[in-house]
Image: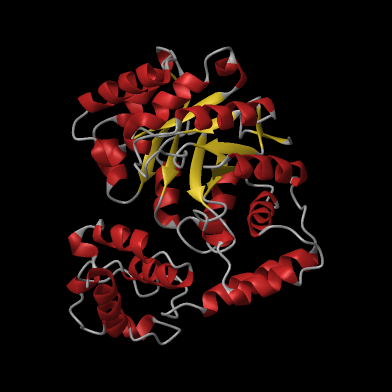
Amino acid sequence: MKYRKFGRLDWKVSALGFGAMRFPVLNNEHSNIDEYNTIKMLRFAIDHGVNYIDSAYGYHRGNSEVVIGKALKDGYRDKVRIATKLPAHEINAAADFDRVLNEQLKRLQTGKIDFYLLHGLNRFDWPKVRDFGVLKWAEGAMKDGRIGYLGFSFHDTFAVLQEIIEAYDNWTMCQIQYNYMNENIQAGTRGLEYAHKKGLAVIAMEPVYAGRLARTPATVAKLWDNAHVQRTPQEWALRWVWNHPEVTLALSGMSKMEQVIENIAAAEYSQPHNLTAADLALIEKVHDTFLALSTVACTGCRDCMPCQYGVNITRIFDLYNEAIIYNTAAENRKSYNSMRPAERADKCNKCGECLAFCTNKVNIPASLEEAHRFFTE
């Protein structure tokens, strides 16, 4: 296992972190974790050098933290640092902060959570928890020893990321979605580099894009098959993330022992700048080939935003294209229908104002109508 410095801390973290959102389950029931195999996987990973486990209050409907607590008995707690998250979107009053944290400590069977993150911050949830006084509260929880360090995970634009980082001087870390298909989506490479320059440890979640980059349509599979060196699509994706020196660790949500073994083996080659020019050129071809399967020629530049009617144009097109490219219609349909109603495509007034800003000449109103039909019919 290779290790990297964790931001400003005098501590090194394994290049591979274990994400606890996709544990194996029984009877296809998300809350019914296969405890035997999960504990076996976690302990195998720790025995092979993984020293960072990431969970959240809502993962596996709360049972992720419970199983981690069981897995870290018998001396394993001393070998790792735990990260888990406060569900910002579920906070309705300042009193919820203590209630949630104390429940998590009990689930995890620990007196201290090493890294505590505000979960999934965006332009809506950040102002809410900020105004409830979450930063002052977290300072108190760090002082009384229940929290080691404070950070946040993130799903929004670079501008929002910048606003959050600038709002507090003592962030230790941030967690962003980052893979070779998401260089310019959400925080992207710009956000990665900005956070790193500010001294934050930067955790890259979804390095294999929730498994999407392991699903290879024929055109993509042909590119990998003709590579000068043979690696699995998962290893290519992980190596691309690790290639960036600004990345502190790649967080992988592993659900099978085979994935744990493969990813630990890949981590032996996780040094920054580990890819050759030929490697990077191949990954760029794969990126372009995936994009060519898109239904809407949207690059996520956001020049069409904000919509005066509140429609989240780029998010909708991102979900629509993903559903087609990676064959994830069912899960993306759920994501679309969980969006705030005011942001969905059916709120488009067809005013056409956005058309003047689209460099790819997408017929945005028509494509929004098509996407809404795809996700709702």
Q: Residue furthest front?
A: 27
Q: Is residue 337 left or right of residue 298?
A: left
Residue 202 location (% of width, % of height): 56, 42
Residue 148 visible at all: no
Tell me which corner region of the image, top left, top right, bottom left or bottom right, holds residue 158. bottom left
Residue 151 location (% of width, % of height): 46, 34
Q: Residue at x 67, y 25 (%)?
A: 47
Query: In this picture, is 58 found above or below 97?
Result: below
Tell me which corner region of the image, top left, top right, bottom left or bottom right, holds residue 285. bottom right
Residue 326 location (% of width, % of height): 48, 67
Q: Is residue 86 left or right of residue 275?
A: left
Q: Residue at x 46, y 19 (%)?
A: 70
Q: Is residue 249 left or right of residue 59?
A: right
How is the protein colored in the picture? secondary structure
Residue 291 visible at all: yes
Q: Residue at x 30, y 68 (%)?
A: 306
Total residue callouts: 0
Tell me which corner region of the image, top left, top right, bottom left or bottom right, holds residue 287. bottom right
Residue 204 location (% of width, % of height): 55, 47
Q: Quadrant of the C terminus?
A: bottom left
Q: Toward the viewer: 204 or 54?
A: 54
Query: In this picture, is 323 found above or below 148?
Result: below
Query: In this picture, is 299 found above or below 173?
Result: below
Q: Quadrant of the N terminus?
A: top right
Q: Toward the viewer: 72 or 89?
A: 72
